């Protein structure tokens, strides 16, 4: 039985929820492009060990569609990962959470511009509803706090990063009909190779990672959860319901972050958390169910078998 795509998308958001916090925590301790390379180098090794025979079987299709794979790896892997960690060097996790809320709208815009995909009222209503929930949580119920936020060049980098991810999500439908392990392996290899020269430049410039238990644990975390598992789950969800319907699930990220803070940091769950939770869940449900299946879901080529 195939896994539920909605569960897969919620799982991807869960794994991504800690990445902003971890990325911000290691800023100044781990050069951004070095951690970007490690983040994809480790998954490439794991996927090669786990799926060598499958990758070999899919290799003819991979070679035939190498330009598409290079494009997807460059946008979703090289640029997205690198810009994320560079931006987190200069801005706060709160700002990133707010800016991340733009992604569902940007995915719809990218799908419309690139593929002329139709926009449905249910999509926009669901995104707006879940966006309100995100803002309730990140501002702690005081929406006037948005007027007090300060933005810098790190936020500009993050916005550019959100656009890159939206383009990647919209273009996933172009991928070849191959097993998800083969797809993610090539994706990881392209991403690791693409960021490696910049990581070597960082090391040559004297920006050496501080190796201790905390930074090593962070490197392992971002390699396994936000990279290998999250991208596998996200690609599966987009394959089955389309990029536009998947986008609102990204609004679960700040919700998970708030819940984790309550569980692990003993922060109290307040009324604004509850209202934000309800708004996000209602919005995600409306966006995911409120219109016919997306063309991108029907045209997706990544095999899940």
Image (cartoon, rainbow, N blue to C red):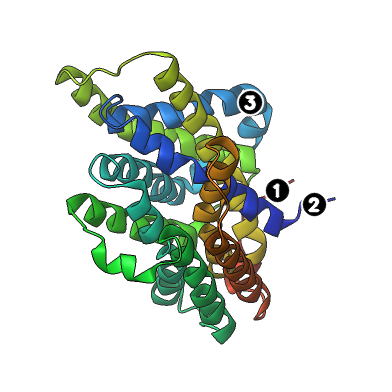
162 with respect to 218 (left or right): left
Residue 75 location in percent, x, y?
Answer: 38, 50
Residue 231 location in percent, x, y?
Answer: 55, 45
Q: State the residue in front, 123 or 61.
A: 123
Whether tag 1 and tag 2 are in contact, CB under 8 A, the answer is: yes
Provide the residue designation for mark 2. Answer: 2
Residue drawn at the location 58% of the way across and 48% of the way down: 259
Residue 118 location in percent, x, y?
Answer: 52, 82
Mark found first going from the N terminus, 3 or 2 = 2
Q: Residues within 10 Å of mark 3 (few under 14, many from 20)?
A: some
User: What is the number of the mark on residue 155?
Assistant: none
Provide the residue designation for mark 1. Answer: 304
Residue 46 location in percent, x, y?
Answer: 58, 24
Give the Cα distance between marks 1 and 3.
16 Å
Query: In front of the other: label 3 or label 2?
Result: 2
Mark found first going from the N terminus, 1 or 3 = 3
279 with respect to 27 (left or right): right
Q: Secondary structure at mark 3?
A: helix
Res. 224 image quadrant: top right
Query: In front of the other: label 1 or label 3?
Result: 1
* Residue 26 visible, this angle: yes
Q: Residues within 10 Å of mark 1 (few under 14, many from 20)?
A: some
Provide the residue designation for mark 3. Answer: 52
């Amino acid at each position: 039985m195939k896994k539920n795509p909605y569960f897969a998308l919620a799982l991807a958001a869960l794994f991504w929820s800690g990445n902003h916090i971890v990325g911000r925590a290691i800023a100044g301790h781990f050069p951004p492009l070095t951690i970007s390379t490690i983040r994809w180098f480790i998954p490439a090794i794991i996927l090669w060990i786990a799926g060598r025979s499958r990758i070999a079987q899919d290799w003819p299709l991979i070679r035939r569609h190498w330009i598409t794979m290079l494009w997807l790896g460059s946008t979703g892997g090289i640029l997205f990962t690198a810009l994320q960690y560079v931006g987190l060097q200069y801005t706060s996790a709160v700002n990133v959470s707010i800016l991340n809320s733009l992604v569902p709208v940007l995915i719809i815009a990218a799908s419309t511009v690139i593929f002329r995909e139709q926009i449905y009222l249910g999509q926009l209503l669901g995104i707006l509803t879940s966006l309100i929930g995100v803002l309730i949580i990140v501002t702690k119920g005081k929406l006037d706090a948005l007027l007090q936020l300060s933005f810098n060049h790190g936020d500009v980098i993050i916005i550019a990063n959100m656009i890159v991810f939206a383009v990647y999500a919209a273009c996933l439908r172009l991928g070849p009909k191959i097993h998800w392990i083969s797809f993610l392996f090539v994706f990881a290899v392209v991403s690791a190779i693409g960021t490696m020269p910049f990581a070597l430049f960082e090391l040559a410039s004297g920006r050496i990672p501080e190796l201790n238990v905390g930074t090593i644990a962070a490197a392992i975390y971002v390699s396994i959860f936000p990279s290998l598992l999250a991208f596998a789950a996200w690609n599966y969800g987009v394959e089955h319901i389309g990029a536009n319907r998947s986008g609102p699930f990204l609004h679960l990220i700040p919700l998970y972050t708030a819940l984790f803070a309550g569980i692990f940091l003993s922060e109290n769950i307040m009324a604004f958390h509850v209202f934000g939770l309800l708004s996000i869940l209602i919005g995600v449900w409306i966006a995911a169910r409120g219109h016919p299946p997306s063309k991108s879901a029907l045209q997706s080529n990544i095999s899940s078998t």
